[in-house]
Amino acid sequence: MRLNSLESAELEKGLFRRMQDASASGVDMASGLDGFSLFSSSISSHAGFFSKPRSRLKKRIRLFSVNSSRVFKRGMDVCGSLAAIIMLLPLFLVIAVWLKLDSPGPLIYRQVRVGLHGRPFYFYKFRSMYIDSEARRAALEKTNESKDGVIFKMKNDPRITRCGRFIRKYSIDEAPQFFNVLLGDMSLVGPRPPLPSEVAQYTLDDRKRLDILPGITCIWQISGRSDIPFREQVVLDKEYIRGQGFWKDVLILFKTVPAVLTGKGAY
């Protein structure tokens, strides 16, 4: 059957040339490689050509979105930690005097913690325990009140000073970690940084907590803090990692304020 329009005639010529080329290349025309299949393959090749730029564009958009969220998060970390340090400076001075009068030892307690992708860093806190606390811990291991045994928690820990008990209840001892945030070792919001001895007991699933920067506060800090068993902490941290975002961080920070003021689950 003849094709009537000029456009169809040109298409027919093109198909005929493709059939000739296929024949010259040794393709068996009786094997089902007719004009229509050649035409279909031509359309498919053109579709593949146009789909590659679309795929690259989607990857670039996704990468831009991830990088933008990181920039926003880092900007919030720097601005928020600077503002907190300035506002809390008078409180820092009062706590410093109280600590010195209460017990001998340094004002700031420096400890190695595990950060992003397992990188160790120095973690800062106001000292809330007597200076021999680490040496005394081994004798207290059997009284560990953490249900899972990975972390050490004890409500009436005898190593805590009088000043330390107050600042731990209201999380004031954590305030120097705003300097960790400025240094880039921590974020305002993220899983709490673990001890190397705790990471040594992690399962592969637990290690997912190390996929992002550790933080000063996160979901389980506003949901009961130390009253929540370690395994539930891991579940909540992974929940945060899956759904992290700028506005979610803002919401967690707002909810942290009443959690700190009530002192629930802090010891």
Image: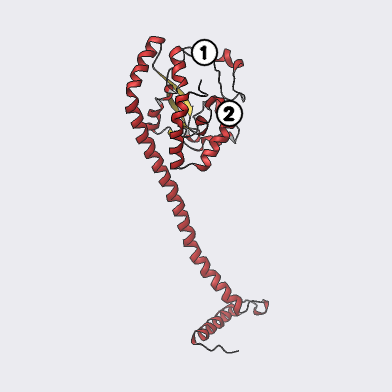
Question: How many numbered marks appear?
Answer: 2
As measured in the structure, the alpha-carbon distance from the residue carrying label 2 to the one carrying label 1 is: 24 Å
Residue closest to the eye, 143 or 19: 143
In this figure, which residue is indicated by the disc labeled 2?
230
Which residue does the image show at 41% across and 10% down from the upper left? 102
Is any part of residue 150 visible from this angle? yes
Foreground mark, 2 or 1? 2
Which residue does the image show at 43% across and 30% down from the upper left? 257
Q: Amino acid at mark 2?
A: Phe
Residue closest to the eye, 53 or 85: 85
Query: Residue 162 — which label?
Result: none
Residues at circles 2 and 1 in contact by the CB criterion of under 8 Å: no
In this figure, which residue is indicated by the disc labeled 1?
135
Q: Earlier in the sequence, mark 2 or mark 1?
A: 1
Q: Amino acid at mark 1?
A: Ala
Which residue does the image show at 57% across and 76% down from the upper left? 39
| 262 over 51 or under it: above or below | above
At mark 1, the secondary structure is helix
At mark 2, the secondary structure is helix
| 147 over 105 or under it: above or below | below
Is any part of residue 128 visible from this angle? no
Where, quadrant-wise, is the N terminus in this rendering?
A: bottom right
The crowding category of the residue bearing disc 2, from other C-alpha atoms within 10 Å (few below 14, some 14 to 19, many at least 20), is some
Which residue does the image show at 48% across and 12% down from the upper left? 132
Looking at the rendering, which quadrant does residue 177 occupy?
A: top left
| x, y percent for residue 243 | 51, 42
Looking at the rendering, which quadrant does residue 12 occupy?
A: bottom right
| 49 over 206 or under it: above or below | below
Looking at the rendering, which quadrant does residue 31 occupy?
A: bottom right
